[in-house]
Structure formats: structure tokens, C-alpha cells
Image (cartoon, helix red, strand yellow):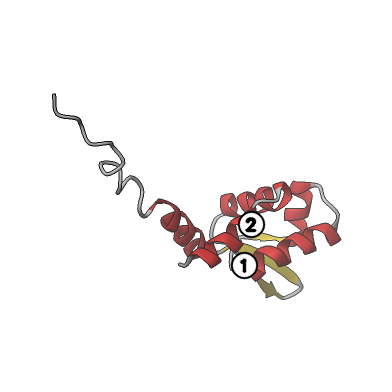
């Protein structure tokens, strides 16, 4: 993952409604949820839900699959793992370098 991709995904998740939508789908597991159930859980109008879903889909965080007449939404777990990995990958690697050298007495 590169910085630009991470920034776009973080920006998409930076909206409270989209973040709650994403968390709802993450909690639902690999089977996902039908759109109508997502709408019921979040209590938002269908047009608002559609707008937020499209933003998450464009940034690779959510996928949709049609099953007969039902549209299933799923969190894309590899994308979530990649984003979390990107954020934590270099955690603390420079911890020892930031200290000022000690002065000799």
C-alpha cells in the first residue's frame, strides 16, 4: 500500500456515517449484510446510504454482490488488513534514534 491509497481510504473513513457503516459491515463478518438491513441498523435514508456506500466501494473498503433481488454489502477484509498494516508497519522503528546524545561529564 502506498501513502496516497492509505490517505484516500482514511479520508473515506473520516466521515462519522461512513465509519459507522464500515464498522457495521466489519462486525457482520464475511457474509455481509443486505442493504436493507444496513439501512435499518443505521437509521438513514436509502439515498444517503447509497452515497456513503459508493464512497467506500470506490476506495476498495466495501464490496457489493447481487444475490437474486438482494444486494449484499461486505467489508473487504484484505483492504482493512492492508490499511492497518500500513499504519502500524514501522511502529517504533526509530525509537532509539530520537534521543539526544548524552553529554560527557
Of the pair 67 and 55, the residue shown nearer to us:
55
Where is residue 95? Give x, y as percent. Answer: 30, 42
Q: Secondary structure at mark 1?
A: loop
Closer to the observer: label 1 or label 2?
2
| Residue nearer the viewer, 68 or 96 | 96
Tell which of 100 and 76 is nearer to you: 100
In the picture, which quadrant includes the N terminus? bottom left
Q: Quadrant of residue 75?
A: bottom right
Q: Neighbour class for label 1 at 10 Å: few (<14), some, many (≥20)?
A: some
Specify the farthest residue to the top: 105
- Is there any visible trace of residue 63 in the rendered image? no
Q: Position of residue 34 (x, y in %)?
A: 70, 61
Number of callouts in the render? Answer: 2
The residue positioned 73% from the left and 49% from the top of the image is 17
Q: Is residue 59 left or right of residue 50?
A: left
The disc at residue 11 is: 2
Tags 1 and 2 touching, CB below 8 Å: yes
Closer to the chain start, of discs 1 and 2, is 2
Q: Looking at the image, is 1 positioned above or below residue 39?
A: below
Work out how far the residue at label 1 is from the one at label 2, CA to CA, in angstroms. Answer: 9 Å
Q: Which mark is residue 59?
A: 1
Looking at the image, residue 102 sits to the left or right of residue 46; the answer is left
Q: Label 2's element?
A: helix
Q: Is residue 15 above or below residue 60?
A: above
How far across and down, in percent of the image, does residue 29 sit?
A: 55, 55
Residue 13's spot in the image, x, y percent?
64, 54
Residue 97's tag is none
Q: Is residue 64 visible?
A: yes
Amino acid at each position: 500500500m502506498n501513502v496516497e491509497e492509505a490517505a484516500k481510504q482514511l479520508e473515506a473513513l473520516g466521515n462519522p456515517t461512513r465509519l459507522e457503516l464500515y464498522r457495521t459491515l466489519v462486525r457482520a463478518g464475511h457474509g455481509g449484510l443486505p442493504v436493507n438491513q444496513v439501512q435499518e441498523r443505521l437509521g438513514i435514508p436509502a439515498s444517503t446510504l447509497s452515497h456513503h456506500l459508493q464512497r467506500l466501494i470506490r476506495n476498495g473498503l466495501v464490496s457489493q454482490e447481487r444475490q437474486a433481488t438482494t444486494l449484499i454489502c461486505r467489508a473487504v477484509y484484505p483492504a482493512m488488513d492492508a490499511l492497518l498494516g500500513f499504519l502500524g508497519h514501522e511502529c517504533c522503528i526509530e525509537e532509539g534514534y530520537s534521543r539526544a546524545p548524552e553529554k560527557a561529564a
